[in-house]
Amino acid sequence: MVSTSVAEVKCSKCNNIYETNVVDHIDLSEDREIIKALKAGKANRVQCPKCKKVMYLKRSIVVNFEPENRIVVFDPSARNNASKETLIQDYNSVISFNETLSEIGEEMEFIVISKLDRLKSLLEEYLKQYK
Ligand SMILES: [Zn+2]
């Protein structure tokens, strides 16, 4: 299931601030219909209720490549190694506090991606393998 949360967004056209649902987490084995938007970098499409301006948010999304043991954090703003390191450390500290997760976590491949092209090729590989 796609997990969403509520975020505050400021419209780039009319500066209206509104709350909207944003995608946080995608499980590829269940959420096939969002892959196309994800590949285009448009998974988080929001629309201003006031002026109808559509924006695509550059938020990080966690993508679970089920049934592969791979978790990808797609974060367009994680441009440098320091911010990638922080994400990986966050992940490691989360799993070390949770017994079930730390068992799974050891077998998990955890990758941080900031470039859409890289995410795209991973998704295409995945689709070839799991039709
Ligand atoms: Zn607006």
Image: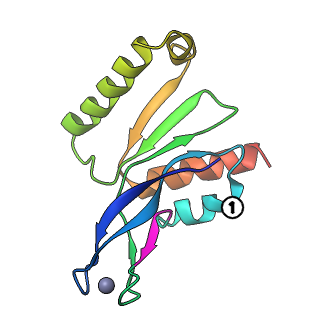
Left or right: where 91 falls relative to 69 = left
Q: Residue at x 25, y 31 (%)?
A: 86
Q: Residue 85 lies in what quarter of the image?
A: top left
Q: Measured from the top left, where is residue 121 in percent x and y?
A: 55, 51
Circle 1 sits on which residue?
A: 33
Magenta residue check for 60 = no
| Ligand 1 is within 8 Å of the C-beta of the residue at disc 1 | no
Q: Residue at x 43, y 57 (%)?
A: 116
- The answer to whether residue 80 is above or below residue 116 is above
Q: Which residues are magenta?
A: 43-47
Q: In front here: 113 or 96?
A: 96
Element carrying mark 1? helix
Identified by mark 1, the residue type is Glu
Q: Residue at x 76, y 44 (%)?
A: 130
- The answer to whether residue 123 is above or below residue 94 is below
In terms of secondary structure, what is the magenta stretch mainly? strand
Q: In front here: 63 or 96?
A: 96
Q: Measured from the top left, where is residue 24 in percent x and y?
A: 47, 49
- How crowded is the residue under tag 1: few (<14 C-alpha within 10 Å), some, or many (20+)? few
Q: In front here: 81 or 60?
A: 60
Q: Measured from the top left, where is residue 114 in percent x and y?
A: 35, 49
Magenta residue check for 44 = yes
